[in-house]
């Protein structure tokens, strides 16, 4: 006996239990699963009306989560654009949530941890540069951190 196909709403709720998703992402997942456009729109409408689907909340959660992981605002913006958001949709929120002083202190703390674990200056620089590159920081931030850590300067704001 063939298995009954899960409703679009049940599938969408299952996806939302895993993690927050944008309307675009959820619509794409439903489309790829083969649900007809009308059922997808009805499902998205029902989720919005119930308060379970809100792009503003998704953006805030996404940005906060990536800032906690020390992603640069530039990289967060790139990722949101890849997800289909325009800068007009997220730029003000990103600027509101970005705390440059706090990020700089946290980057210094992380650089000091890397320095304390590195066997030599080259290993420290290589690991720090890799970390910063993966999070979208420019070379200038790398140089500032290296100078601060290798000079043993106190944490600065």
Image (tube, rainbow, N blue to C red):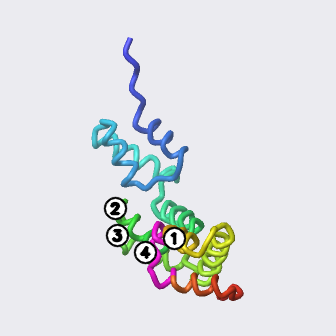
Q: CA distance from mark 3 to mark 4?
A: 14 Å
Residue on which disc 3 sits: 86
The image position of residue 74, as x and y in percent, is: 43, 75
Q: How many marks?
A: 4
Q: CA distance from mark 3 to mark 2?
A: 7 Å
Of callouts 4 and 1, which one flags the residue occurring earlier in the amino acid sequence? 4
The image position of residue 14, as x and y in percent, is: 50, 39
For label 1, count other residues whose C-alpha is less than 10 Å away and answer few (under 14), some (14-19) or many (20+): few
The image position of residue 43, as x and y in percent, is: 40, 43
In what quadrant of the picture does the N terminus appear? top left
Q: Nearer the viewer, mark 4 or mark 1?
A: 1
Q: Secondary structure at mark 2?
A: loop
Q: Secondary structure at mark 1?
A: helix
Residue on which disc 2 sits: 84
In depth, the one of 89 and 100 nearer the eye is 100
Query: Residue 140 magenta-drawn?
Result: yes
Of callouts 3 and 1, which one flags the residue occurring earlier in the amino acid sequence? 3
Q: CA distance from mark 4 to mark 2?
A: 16 Å
Residue contact at pointers 4 and 1, CB within 8 angstroms: no
The relative height of residue 77 versus residue 45 in the rendered view (above or below) is below
In depth, the one of 97 and 111 nearer the eye is 111
Q: Secondary structure at mark 3?
A: loop
* Magenta part of the chain: 132-142
Q: Nearer the viewer, mark 3 or mark 1?
A: 1
Of callouts 1 and 2, which one flags the residue occurring earlier in the amino acid sequence? 2
- Which residue corresponds to the image point at 41% horizontal and 32% vertical from the top-left? 7
Residue on which disc 4 sits: 74
Q: Nearer the viewer, mark 1 or mark 2?
A: 1
Residue on which disc 1 sits: 126
In depth, the one of 6 and 105 nearer the eye is 105
- Which residue corresponds to the image point at 68% horizontal and 88% vertical from the top-left? 153
């Amino acid at each position: 006996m063939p298995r009954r196909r899960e409703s679009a709403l049940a599938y969408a709720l299952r996806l939302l239990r895993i993690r927050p998703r944008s309307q675009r992402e959820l619509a794409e997942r439903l489309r790829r699963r083969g649900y007809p456009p009308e059922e997808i729109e009805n499902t998205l409408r029902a989720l919005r009306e119930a308060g379970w689907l809100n792009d503003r909340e998704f953006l805030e959660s996404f940005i906060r989560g990536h800032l906690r992981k020390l992603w640069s605002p530039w990289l967060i913006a790139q990722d949101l654009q890849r997800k289909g958001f325009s800068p007009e949709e997220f730029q003000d929120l990103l600027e509101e949530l970005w705390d440059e002083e706090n990020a700089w202190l946290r980057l210094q703390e992380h650089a000091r941890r890397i320095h304390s674990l590195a066997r030599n200056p080259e290993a420290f620089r290589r690991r720090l540069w890799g970390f910063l590159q993966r999070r979208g920081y420019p070379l200038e931030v790398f140089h500032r951190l290296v100078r601060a850590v290798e000079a043993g300067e106190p944490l600065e704001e």
